[in-house]
Amino acid sequence: MRIVEQENKSPVSSEDLLELLQTKREDGTPLQERKRPFLSGFPLATTALGIMIVALGIMVIILKSDIAVLKSDITDLKNLKVQVATLDPTTQVKTIESKLGDMKKEKDAIREEMSQLQAELETIKTEPKKEIHKTPNRVRHRPPSTNTKVRKVMNEEVLLKKTSPQGMLFSDFSRATSLDPLPK
């Protein structure tokens, strides 16, 4: 390691510094002046540059709106193209022919159904003539016995005794929907 010896220096006062500064000025050594940038000397150039930036921004906005208009025009043209394609006579003839074929199939199906219905109608007309000659079988019903009536009344009385009027009226919906038996 190196050992550095420090010299005893006297502190510098502000007065000594001022005297040195004055002597340098008198000697004629000028201080270096700062150079100004090129554009700061011309305020017109900066304003012109700002105006150009604003003009470019406006041009960009106008171009975006023109692009949107062009896109909508292109979609309109596509729609017109589709409409013209549907107006093509060959496609119209094909669609009409397919509809006509479907109608013929439906007509044939309806004729078949009509012939089936006519055949069923003829069979129905001939059947009632056969049934007129037959005598209908009568079924006798016995009147209910008194014992069953008595049982029904007794069952109703037992049910009335089991259910109290409090059990019939529900104070809230939860009691009505619960599956638990009523408390006694």
Image: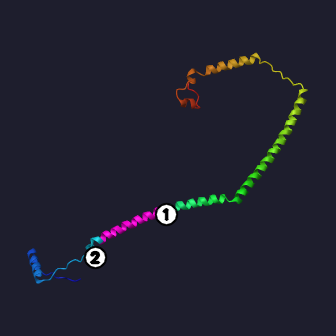
> Up-down: is 37 above or below 104?
below
Where disc 1 sits, the SS reads: helix
The residue singled out by tag 2 in the image is 38
Q: Position of residue 65 (x, y in %)?
A: 46, 61
Residue 94: within the magenta?
A: no
Amino acid carrying label 2: it is Phe
Residues 183 and 128: in front is 128
Please give the name of the residue rendered at 64% of the width and 59% of the height, measured from the top-left corner.
84
- The label number, if any, that marks residue 24 in the structure image: none
* Displayed quadrant of residue 82: bottom right
Q: Which residue is mark 1?
A: 67
Of the residues under marks 2 and 1, which one precedes in the sequence? 2
Q: Which image quadrant is residue 63 in?
A: bottom left
Left or right of residue 126: residue 67: left
Badge 2 marks a residue whose secondary structure is loop
**Label 2: few (<14), some (14–19) or many (≥20) C-alpha neighbours in 10 Å:** few
In the displayed structure image, the side of residue 85 where residue 11 appears, left or right = left
Where 111 falls versus 2 (above or below)? above
Residue 165 or residue 126, whichever sits in front: 126
Residue in the picture at 63% in, 58% down: 83
Circle 1: residue type: Ile
Report if the CB atoms under discs 2 and 1 are less than 8 Å apart.
no
Q: Residue 44 at what x, y percent from top left?
A: 29, 71
The quadrant in which the C terminus is found is top right
Residue 65 appears left or right of 90 = left
At 87% from the left and 33% from the top, the residue drawn is 125
Dominant SS of magenta comes to helix
Residue 58, magenta (yes or no):
yes
Q: Which residues are magenta?
A: 45-67
Q: Label 1: few (<14), some or many (≥20) within 10 Å?
A: few
Callout in the foreground (2, 1): 1
